[in-house]
Amino acid sequence: MSSLQHLVLDIDIILSTSVALTKIDLSPLAVLGSASLSISRIDLYVHTQALPPAVTYAQLLRSLSEYEEIVKLVKEGVLVIHSEKTAPDACDLDTRRAKTSTPA
């Protein structure tokens, strides 16, 4: 039986000028804490269409800081946050994985 090794989440937030990141409910991401028991790496891409970029790594971390399990995953390197970046498509991920995997 195979288990999920790598999870990629790509979240595009549409912010109006009157809405700040702190007003966005990120609580559904709390499930990542329990998901990490079976997933060795989680890449979280969060971006907006705003110019200049409206979401920084520090803002995301601050917004997620109330979820202890998420903070723990970031510190352990299981959860990697990419602010203002779009996730690579599946073909790019497969190519990158093939280049970095080591033969058994």
Image: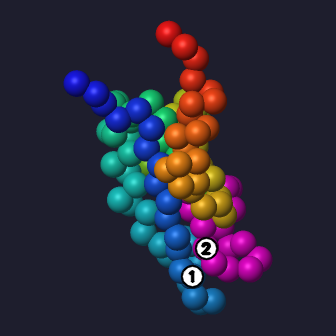
Q: Are the two marked residues, 1 and 2, in contact with CB atoms closer than 8 angstroms?
A: yes
Residue 65: x and y, percent?
53, 51
Q: Which span of residues is magenta-colored?
A: 45-58
Query: Is the residue marked by circle 1 packed among few (<14), some (14-19), or many (20+) residues within 10 Å?
Result: some
Q: Is residue 86 above or below residue 13?
A: above
Residue at the outermost left position: 1
Q: Counting residues from the N terminus, which is met first, the one under dot 1 or under dot 2?
A: 1
Residue type at mark 2?
Answer: Thr
Q: Is residue 53 above or below residue 73?
A: below
Residue at 53% across, 48% down: 91
Viewer-nearest of labels 1 and 2? Answer: 2
Q: Colour mode? A: rainbow
Residue at the outermost top position: 104
What's the distance in space between the residues labelled 1 and 2, CA to CA? 7 Å
Question: Is residue 32 or residue 8 the one in the foreground?
Answer: 8
In magenta stretch: residue 29: no
Judging by the rendered image, the residue that carries numbered circle 2 is 48
Which quadrant of the figure contains the N terminus?
top left
Q: Is residue 94 above or below residue 88?
A: above
